[in-house]
């Protein structure tokens, strides 16, 4: 089952990156920073 765990880890890392770290071109902020700015 090792390949399944490795694939799951890679996918989990990508989801975290996509939701929290990637720069959105329109806002030039990460999604997390964009949410903080919207709520402030």
Image (cartoon, helix red, strand yellow):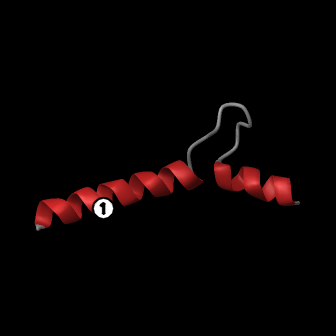
Identify the residue position indicated by label 1 in the image: 9
Outermost residue, top side: 25
Residue 12: horizontal and vertical position, in percent?
Answer: 38, 60
> Is 30 left, or right, of 34 in this rendering?
left
Residue depicted at 70% across the width and 37% down the height: 28
Give the quarter of the image for residue 22: top right
Q: Is residue 35 above or below residue 29?
A: below
Residue depicted at 83% across the width and 53% down the height: 38
Q: Badge 1: how crowded within 10 Å, few (<14), some, or many (20+)?
A: few
Residue 19: horizontal and vertical position, in percent?
Answer: 56, 53
> Is 15 left, or right, of 1 in this rendering?
right
> Is 9 left, or right, of 2 in this rendering?
right
Residue 20: horizontal and vertical position, in percent?
Answer: 58, 55
Q: Is residue 19 above or below residue 5?
A: above
Residues 33 and 2: in front is 2
**Total numbered labels placed on residues in the image:** 1
**Quadrant where the N terminus lies?**
bottom left
Give the quarter of the image for residue 5: bottom left
Badge 1 element:
helix
Residue depicted at 31% across the width and 55% down the height: 10
> Is 23 left, or right, of 15 in this rendering?
right
**Quadrant where the C terminus lies?**
bottom right
Residue depicted at 30% across the width and 62% down the height: 9
């Amino acid at each position: 089952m090792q390949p399944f765990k490795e694939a799951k880890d890679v996918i989990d890392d990508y989801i975290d990156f996509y939701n929290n770290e990637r720069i959105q071109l329109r806002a030039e902020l990460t999604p997390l920073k964009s949410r903080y700015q919207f709520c402030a």
